[in-house]
Amino acid sequence: MRAPLPFPACSPLLTSALRSFGLSTVSDTMPDSVHPCLTCGACCHEYRVEFPVYELQSMGGSVPDALAHEVHGNRWRMDGTERHPVRCVALIGRCGKQSICGIYEQRPSTCRSFEMGSERCNQARARHGLAPLDAPWDDFPLAA
Ligand code: SF4
Ligand code: SF4
């Protein structure tokens, strides 16, 4: 099994992900106004993240091949979400403190369709000691 890829502060992926949210850095002191996903990341620590092979960059999609592995047939999975404790290799930060998807613009459809405030979202949050969410946001999830 490959070791998780590090995302140093100078990582172009991280820089571009942060810029998407108007941030310059990931810190422990996120302002209260930031999207709840940026202080959560529980779902990226909870679920297996699988997606169709055609979403890989090598197949014309956006997900970096180096961050995922084949499951079977045409199914691939984000590295780090196949084991326990779960932690997707693309996640940057610490669960419940600060978190951001290092490949936000390139994340798989599974993550794009995961609904913040849904039952699964709140189940993941509860398992990580975070209060449930019920307020709708227009653009989510940012960390998932
Ligand atoms: S979608 Fe829910 S569980 Fe995932 S990061 Fe956002 S608030 Fe947390
Ligand atoms: S949103 Fe990003 S960090 Fe979270 S599971 Fe998906 S690819 Fe991984």
Image (spheres, rainbow, N blue to C red):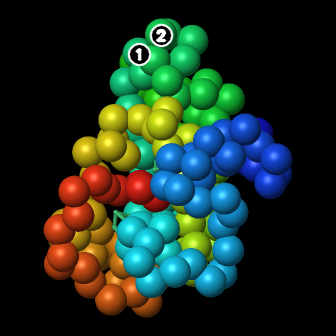
Q: What secondary structure is marked by label 2?
A: loop
Disc on res. 9: none
Quarter the N terminus occupies = top right
The answer to whether 117 is drawn above or below residue 69 in the figure is below
- Going from N to C along the chain, the mark reached first, 1 or 2, is 1
Residue at image position (45%, 83%) is 32
For label 1, the residue is 54
Decide if residue 101 is on the left or right side of residue 42: right
Residues at circles 1 and 2 in contact by the CB criterion of under 8 Å: yes
Which residue was labeled with disc 2? 60
Label 1: element kind = helix
Q: Amino acid at mark 2?
A: Gly
Q: Is residue 21 visible?
A: yes
Q: Quadrant of ligand 1?
A: bottom left
Between residue 52 and residue 21, name the one nearer to us: 21
Neighbours of disc 1 within 10 Å: few (<14), some (14-19), many (20+):
some
Q: Is residue 127 visible?
A: no
